[in-house]
Amino acid sequence: GRHAISGRLIFPSGQRASYQLKIKLETNGEGDLTVFSDMNGNFSFRSLTAGNYTVVIEGEHFQPVRENVFIEPYNTSPAPGVGPSGTE
């Protein structure tokens, strides 16, 4: 796929995660993916296809957080009335 989901983990206090946390990406039938955040809380899932995903953040001292994400497919057809070069 040509899509990605990325982010930065920030605690409710406003502090960034200063240690690695496990982030799981639940997919619909494509197998779940797992990455660990870096020391600044950054994470990324790359080479994804369009569809529905759930990002799950897990840590030892807090309950898992779940966020649903929908990636729309690319629209490869030109807008109505617009030709390939941008003219009618």
Image (spheres, helix red, strand yellow):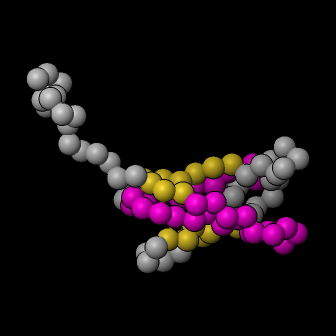
Residue farthest toward the top in the current orientation of the protein: 87
- Which residue is depicted at the point 88% across and 47% down? 13
- Which residue is depicted at the point 84% across and 72% down? 60
* Residue 18 spot, x, y in % from top left: 82, 53
* Residue 66 spot, x, y in % from top left: 67, 64
Q: Split into 4 quadrants, where in the image is the N terminus?
A: bottom left
Quadrant of residue 51 within the rendered picture: bottom left
Question: Going by the image, does 34 lie left or right of 63?
Answer: left
* Residue 26 spot, x, y in % from top left: 55, 71
- Which residue is depicted at the point 39% across and 61% down? 49
Question: Going by the image, does 42 lie left or right of 6?
Answer: right
Question: Going by the image, does 35 lie left or right of 75?
Answer: right
- Which residue is depicted at the point 88% across and 69% down? 61
Q: Is residue 36 at all visible to an observer of this figure?
A: no
* Residue 48 spot, x, y in % from top left: 43, 60
Q: Split into 4 quadrants, where in the image is the C terminus?
A: top left
User: What range of the chain is rendered magenta?
Assistant: 39-68
Q: Is residue 60 magenta?
A: yes
- Counting the numbered discs, the total is 0
Q: Is residue 58 magenta?
A: yes
Q: Main secondary structure of the magenta part?
A: strand
Of residues 64 and 38, which is closer to you in this image?
64
Q: Is residue 71 at all visible to an observer of this figure?
A: yes
Quadrant of residue 44 within the rendered picture: bottom right
